[in-house]
Image: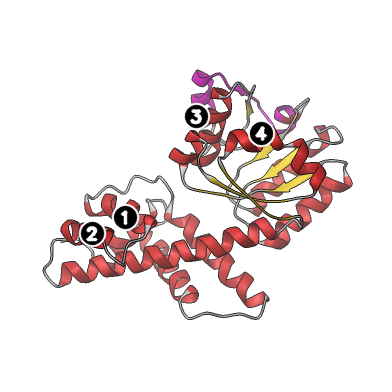
Amino acid sequence: MGAGNMGGAMAVRLLGRGWAVRIRDIDVAKAQALRQHGAEVAPTPSVAAAGAAALVVCVVDAQQMDEVLFGPQGAAAQLAAGTPVLLCPTVAPQDIEHCAGLLAAGGCLPIDAPMSGGPARAQAGTMSLMVACGDAAFAAAADLLADLSSRLFRVGSRPGDGARTKLVNNLLAGINLVGAAEALAMAQRLGLDPARTLEVIEQSSGQSWIGSDRMRRAIAGDFAPRAHLCLLQKDTRLAVAAAAEAGFEGPLGPAARDAFQQAAEAGLADLDDGALLRLLAPGP
């Protein structure tokens, strides 16, 4: 359920591994593009779920997750008892807990399974999956999980712990990306060549994977969205909120959240999240 950057890449991966895949996405063009790989395109979530051996929900936010599962054409009503349901979006832990509870009450096997790594790694089957679920659900989805990810982490049995782990990860990703953009904006202001400076950083103590990946494209002026800036805007906000609920506040999380919010308000939300460099070092 969902054929965006990550959902589409996961679908291609599963098709290549011999799975029969049925797709439903609100963006008809994205869903139709998967036909060439052998996917079947369904008109509604309920049609997509009918007779499914497993369901993967890969949408943007909690509202979409709730709609595709429990809306008027929702998938949940079509799922047989014992069907594993992977909940992959990055959302608040309480939203995962709510959906998992409803699915379990209907006899399904919910799996809190947020992902990380980007579309290329999703298609290669090397993305990270942070899984929290009961033993029965984990066993029922073992083959599916193995084909989706060679970097599978079972972080607990409590639904919501996958979401918590993902928010911790994405907060650090956001902090690292803001730091990388700030450092390269500073390099430009100091009259340094940003590309050469990034080469130094990549072989030195300031290196981060997300900084290298995003800033190399940003320096070249490539802001085509592999990962939309609005996603880290959402994720850093959710992470800081989850921390506050637990009674914790760090010095950098709120700063990263505010930087992404400022970038979104500057009109960069639909660009690649590397466009943060454009905010800090605008061109002529």
What secondary structure is marked by label 4? helix
Q: What residue is rendered at 78% in x and 25% in y?
A: 51
Numbered circle sitting on residue 212:
1
Residue 227 image point, x, y percent: 43, 49
- Secondary structure mostly seen in magenta is helix
Question: In the shown orientation, is residue 37 left or right of residue 129?
Answer: left
* Sequence-first tag of 4 and 2: 4
Please identify the quadrant where the C terminus is shown. bottom left
Instruction: For marks 3 and 1, give the CA distance.
Output: 31 Å
What secondary structure is marked by label 1? helix
Q: Are marks 3 and 2 in contact (CB under 8 Å)?
A: no
Which residues are the magenta region? 31-48
Q: Please name the amino acid that badge 3 sits on.
A: Ala
Q: Are marks 2 and 1 in contact (CB under 8 Å)?
A: yes
Please identify the quadrant where the N terminus is shown. top right
Q: Residues within 10 Å of mark 4 (few under 14, many from 20)?
A: some
Q: Which residue is mark 4?
A: 144
Instruction: For marks 1 and 4, give the CA distance.
Output: 31 Å
Q: Please name the amino acid that badge 2 sits on.
A: Leu
Residue 140 image point, x, y percent: 77, 36
Q: Which residue is mark 3?
A: 29
Quarter where residue 78 is shown: top right
- Up the image or down, 73 lies above or below 259; here it is above
Question: In the shown orientation, is residue 178 left or right of residue 200?
Answer: right
Question: In the shown orientation, is residue 54 left or right of residue 152?
Answer: right
* Sequence-first tag of 3 and 2: 3
Q: Which residue is mark 2?
A: 198
What secondary structure is marked by label 2? helix
What secondary structure is marked by label 3? helix
Q: Please name the amino acid that badge 4 sits on.
A: Leu
Q: Which is more foreground, mark 3 or mark 2?
A: 2
